[in-house]
Image (spheres, rainbow, N blue to C red):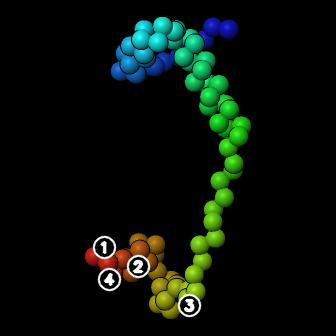
Amino acid sequence: MKTTVDIPDALLDEVKVLVAHEKTTLRALIEQGLRHVIEQRRTQRPFRLRKATFNGEGLLPHADEESWERIRSLIYEERGG
């Protein structure tokens, strides 16, 4: 099947050098790249957020009604942030 793909000029220039050096074609390189991406996604594990809790008392009593910006400033208050 034929299709049209927009490729940035700078990338295409790099690809032209590569295909000439490797004595291949742009089509072969695109096919190889697409197969690689498909295989990676097929074997990739889904992202799982690790449990990141720690012992503490939770939010400071006066922080439970604060905005996220204020909470962030409280977090970094003593760290030069």
Task: Pinpoint residue 70: horizontal percent, then vertical percent.
Answer: 40, 77
Q: Amino acid at mark 3?
A: Glu
Contact, mark 2 vs mark 1 (Cβ under 8 Å): yes
Q: What is the distance, in whole Å, between disc 1 and disc 4 at their CAs?
A: 7 Å
Mark drawn on residue 5:
none
Q: For mark 2, what is the residue?
A: 75
Q: For mark 3, what is the residue?
A: 57
* Mark closer to the chain start, 4 or 3: 3
Residue 11 falls in image quadrant: top left
Q: Residues within 10 Å of mark 2 (few under 14, many from 20)?
A: few
Contact, mark 3 vs mark 1 (Cβ under 8 Å): no
- Left or right: residue 27 versus residue 79 is right
Q: For mark 4, what is the residue?
A: 78
* Mark closer to the chain start, 3 or 2: 3
Q: What is the distance, in whole Å, between disc 3 and disc 1 at their CAs?
A: 23 Å
Camera-nearest residue between 36 and 68: 36
Q: For mark 1, what is the residue?
A: 81
- Left or right: residue 21 versus residue 80 is right
Q: Dot 2: what SS?
A: helix
Contact, mark 4 vs mark 3 (Cβ under 8 Å): no
